[in-house]
Amino acid sequence: MDLDRTRTAPKENRNEREAAFDKNGSQSGTHSVASLIKALVIALRPKQATKNLFVYAAIVFAGKLFVPVLFARVTVAFLLFTIVTGSVYLFNDLQDVEQDRQHPKKKHRPIASGRLTVHVAWAALILLALFGVGCSFLLSVPFGIAVAAYLALQIAYCLGLKQIVLLDVFAIAAGFVLRAVAGGAVIHVGISHWLLLCTLQLALFLGFGKRRQELVLLGAGAGSHRAILEEYSLPFLDQMINIVAGVTIVCYSVYSVESDTARLHPHLWTTVPFVIFGVCRYLYLVYQKGWGGAPDEVLLKDRTLQVTMILWFLVVMLLFVFDHNGQALLGWQ
């Protein structure tokens, strides 16, 4: 596969587009500082910061969410991860600018549309990445290593891994696992291997759902927008989604019964129905509503899924407070 050919349009076509952007007041010559800042904020994709909530997994399942000092450290870690992921989004958009201009939705992104100049994007990318990784090491060396590993993985993804079938989705999933690991590292708390497996399976589930929605949205021209989509088909992705959906539920179910956390809180298994319902609800949104192209948007849009996650979280918190090994819970051993 000729990656240079897929990333680079003929020079004359680029010049025509840039001329059009100049005419519409979208290029650097007519950019105001306010419009550049607004475009930069949009390019950082703040809505996708919801993905970084995985940083809180370790503190939640260690039962230390309400320890102020630890919660503050994890919150700082969340903010630093958000800064680093923002730099990754800029790098990805700079690499894919030509393909994005051909995409029905991505063509409106700040860099692809010309609202954010390439020079400003590169400058912001470098500053944010250096600041985020540097502050991460100051906060905690193990956390800094996890953040640096995440950044290296995402750069590798942007430069080549996303062109390799299956490995593209697994690379995305590994990023979520590193978020969970980083959350434990910043408060020096070990994270259960079962919880890491749950995170991996859930991320694969979301990733394959995203690929499926891209195929549905782009149709026969999917390969021209993203070459790797030629390697996927709806029947294949449906099988992958079914597999990882089932394994996600099994992993969490085993975790809720057999993990060290489950032994300390023996009724943790009562949270399994929320997980099953949440997975089924997401499948409904993907197959019946045509959602799933952007998991963060699904989370922000679907009230039922939001309520399910809130109820799951509240039940987990209640169990951590009142459910202890050897004690009856509401008269129920």
Image: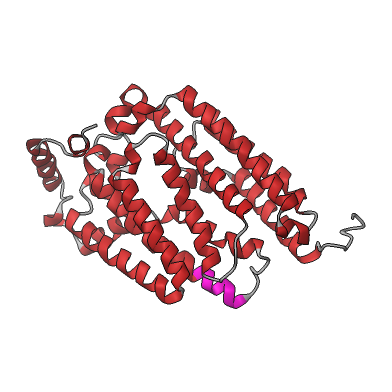
Of the 4 image quadrants, the one containing the N terminus is top left
Write the residue at 74% across / 56% down. Answer: 262
Q: Look at the magenta stretch and give its main secondary structure.
A: helix
Give the percent coordinates (x, y) of residue 199.
56, 49
Q: Residue 72: say if magenta.
A: yes
Indicate whether 143 appears above or below 15: below
The residue under the point 80% across, 54% down is 267
Tell me which segment is drawn in magenta. 68-75
Q: Is residue 157 above or below residue 287?
A: below
The x and y percentages for residue 204 are 51, 41
The residue drawn where x is 11% and y is 56% is 29
Instruction: Describe residue 50's horizontal placement relative to residue 100 as left or right.
Output: right
Q: Nearer the viewer, residue 269 or 98?
A: 269
Q: Residue furthest right?
A: 331
Q: Nearer the viewer, residue 51 or 230?
A: 230
Residue 128 falls inside the magenta stretch: no
Which residue is at 67% across, 44% downward? 275
Find residue 259 and report its horizontal and vertical position in percent.
Answer: 71, 55
Q: Residue 282, can we see it?
A: yes
Q: Estimate the x, y position of residue 142 in percent, counting from the top left.
A: 47, 69
Work out whether residue 44 can be spotted. Answer: no
Snapshot quadrant of residue 105: top left
Q: Quadrant of the C terminus?
A: bottom right
